Image: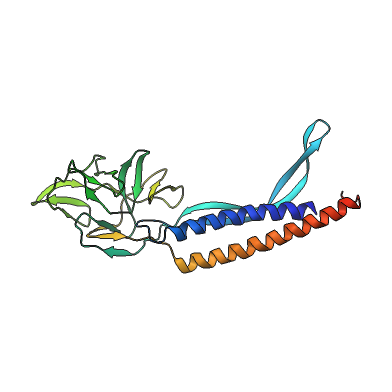
């Protein structure tokens, strides 16, 4: 009886995490540069159950649980939407812009850039867009051109080259506001498109289906726990719990 109860409770925690991940993806469906997150459910994991003994907590048995593991973000490129604004930049294929935030270096595909009062290229959050040398980019207030390789020119003169990188599939951490950090970075393999932005790469149909499946599983586990709880109460009243 206790095994089924513990299994059901662990399953509820798993499905709750899955629902949180899916809800986050749906909420950011219209967030530019957002990369959908995904949870991988790992099931049938043995876990030791502890109980109170004469001299403290002691192992009283094992139960089979399941656990949700956040495996990372989906790096599949999203759609590119044309805006016509020369400060807006999109990445075709794989890659990220390098920016400087209050939390340190970060990477983003949200290319809604603008020029601040000091003539420096910044993100929609006001963070500095960095050059390939790791410095803020001073473009002044005149229009500029960006090549597919990220080279910025004004009046035929090279101003700077954008800091552009690829990230590995594993270890990416979401910071919010379409910003990400990673343990290492890889050479840039994509191309920059000026006058456009990257949309979210989330799939609303797929996320909705995943939410429905998780909700159904959650409901089934809730029913299991309620039934097992009733059985435990009946067994306790008859003094037959082992």
Whether residue 100 is situated above or below residue 124 in the rendered picture: above
Number of numbered discs overlaid on the protein picture: 0
Q: Answer above or below: position of 138 versus 145.
A: above
Please tell me which residue is depicted at 75% across the width and 47% down the height of the picture.
62
Where residue 182 sits, quadrant-wise, is top left
Q: Position of residue 66 (x, y in %)?
A: 65, 54
Seen at 91% across and 53% down, the residue is 238
The residue depicted at 73 percent of the width and 44 percent of the height is 48
- The structure's colour scheme is rainbow
Residue 196: name its quadrant.
bottom left
Is residue 92 in view? no
Q: On the rendered image, what quadrant is the N terminus found in?
A: bottom right
76 vs 141, nearest the viewer:
141
Q: Position of residue 35 (x, y in %)?
A: 41, 56
Q: Give residue 149's position: percent from left, percent from top.
A: 22, 54
Of residues 226 and 204, which is closer to you in this image? 226
The residue lying furthest to the left in this view is: 155
Looking at the image, which residue is at 18% across and 40% down?
A: 118
Q: Is residue 12 left or right of residue 164?
A: right
Residue 137 in the image: state x and y as whole percent. Answer: 21, 43
Q: Residue furthest top?
A: 55
Q: Is residue 235 left or right of residue 158?
A: right
Can residue 222 be seen at all in this image of the molecule? yes
């Amino acid at each position: 009886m206790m095994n089924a109860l513990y299994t059901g409770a662990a399953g509820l925690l798993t499905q709750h995490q899955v629902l949180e991940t899916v809800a986050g993806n749906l909420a950011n469906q219209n967030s530019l540069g957002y990369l959908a997150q995904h949870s991988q459910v790992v099931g049938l994991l043995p876990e030791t159950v502890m109980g109170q003994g004469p001299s403290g907590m002691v192992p009283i048995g094992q139960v089979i649980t399941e656990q949700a593991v956040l495996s990372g973000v989906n790096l599949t490129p999203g759609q590119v939407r044309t805006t016509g604004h020369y400060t807006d930049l999109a990445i075709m294929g794989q890659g990220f812009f390098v920016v400087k935030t209050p939390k340190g270096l970060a990477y983003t595909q949200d290319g809604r850039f603008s020029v601040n009062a000091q003539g420096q290229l910044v993100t929609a959050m006001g963070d500095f867009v960095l050059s390939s040398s790791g410095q803020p980019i001073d473009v002044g207030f005149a229009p500029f051109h960006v090549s597919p390789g990220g080279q910025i020119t004004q009046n035929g003169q090279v101003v700077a080259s954008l800091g552009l990188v690829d990230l590995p599939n594993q270890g990416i951490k979401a910071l919010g506001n379409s910003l990400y950090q990673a343990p290492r970075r890889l050479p840039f393999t994509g191309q920059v498109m000026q006058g456009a932005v990257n949309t979210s790469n989330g799939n609303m149909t797929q996320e909705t289906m995943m939410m429905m499946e998780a909700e159904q599983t959650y409901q089934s586990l809730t029913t299991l726990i309620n039934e097992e709880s009733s059985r435990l109460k009946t067994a306790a009243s008859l003094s037959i719990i082992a």
